[in-house]
Image (tube, rainbow, N blue to C red):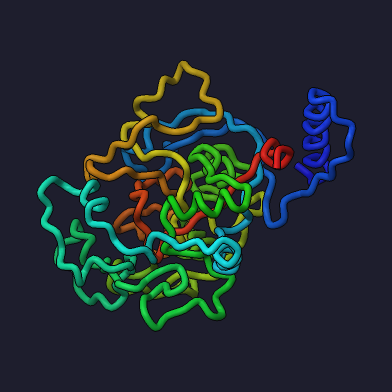
Amino acid sequence: MSKSLIFLTLASLLFINCKDSNKNQDISLIFPEGMIWVEGKSYTKGAKNEDPYAMMREKPSHEVYVDGFFIDATEVTNNQFQKFVNETGYVTIAERQIDWNEMKKNLPINTPKPHDSLLQPGSLIFNKDLKRVVNMDNYFQWWKWQIGASWKSPAGPGSNIEGKGNYPVVHVAYEDALAYCEWANRKLPTEAQWESAAQGNYDKAVFTWGDEVNLLNTNANTWQGDFPTNNESIDGFEMIAPVKSFSPNSIGIFDMIGNVWEITDDLFNVNYYSELNSVTDLKNLKGASSCYNPSNPYEIQHVMKGGSFLCHDSYCASYRISARMGVSIDSGSDHTGFRTIVTPEMLLNK
């Protein structure tokens, strides 16, 4: 849909809004800078029949309808998050002192308290110096808690984001993303909105560029080589990449596959798709009413989408539109970020 048609849509909504409230004042409408219009449409959400990497939590697929909305053309960048912090003084979860009484609520009963030296502000980072893996089921081997890691020190003390203003902001948790959204008059996308945007002009594609897995390395920042010990960086990046390093999807949205996972507003429930009533009109889905992940039963998790620079077909192959994983509401890492959406109604009510 062209920008002029979107303007007319907004204008008609504004006219109705003003008529109902008996307002005759002139109000200007501004197309949101850095955002892309995703027109209302029906599409196939969830695993596609031809996708050999689809997991049970992505099944069964279902036809949904999502109203039109605007979405960020890229993940929220360090520059954008820096402006938010400068104006509000916001302190992210990764930068705050750890409250053991709060933390243990998300852990099994009687979990022993770690030494105080470990209960320091920080975040998870990928251990890129790992040389050998004993058991691929133990992902703790390639993750480590880095004291002092945060959005402005992504690798911990001594690191910074100087010269990386156009990189996705990372080490942000769900609460941090919500705070940014409140400041910017934005929202996190639902999973249905996220997949609608990722599909672009498609309605049942496996990837944002279609169904051709052989185009992965030229369209997304993922892992090439032996995961997690040897990244051959065929796509040009060993770790995180600047936004817009790869071509956009069919409607102009960048990096929805690979680079960093993107937090959504939906609660993560592995049974959500199988419990949907297919007879019900599946319009503007808001996600599961409760969280359920048997692998982490004590955590409240939200759905994250798109995969990251760590995705590889030998492990999770989450560089697909339907891929979905859960992330704890208080957790961040160096491969997790977010992007925002805004509806015409939100713009009119600003």
Quadrant of the image for the C terminus? top right
x then y, percent, for residue 163? 56, 80
The answer to whether 253 is drawn above or below residue 218 in the figure is above
- Compare residues 283 and 160 and report the one nearer the observer: 160
The answer to whether 251 is drawn above or below residue 87 in the figure is above
Q: Residue at x 51, y 59 (%)?
A: 215
Tell me: 305 left or right of 120: right
- Compare residues 204 and 107 and report the one nearer the observer: 107
Q: Residue at x 32, y 32 (%)?
A: 271
Q: Quadrant of residue 149?
A: bottom left
Q: Residue at x 53, y 29 (%)?
A: 64
In the rendered picture of this protein, how many numbered marks are placed on residues? 0
Tell me: 154 left or right of 219: left
- Compare residues 66 and 157 and report the one nearer the observer: 157
Q: Residue at x 22, y 41 (%)?
A: 297
Tell me: 132 left or right of 310: left
x then y, percent, for residue 223? 39, 66
Q: Furthest residue to the top?
A: 279
x then y, percent, for residue 144? 26, 68
- Compare residues 162 and 204 and report the one nearer the observer: 162
x then y, percent, for residue 74? 59, 58
Tell me: 214 left or right of 340: left
The answer to whether 261 is drawn above or below residue 38 in the figure is below
Q: Is residue 245 visible in this depiction of the protein? A: no
Q: Is residue 274 visible in this depiction of the protein? A: yes
Q: Furthest residue to the bottom?
A: 158
Quadrant of the image for the N terminus? top right
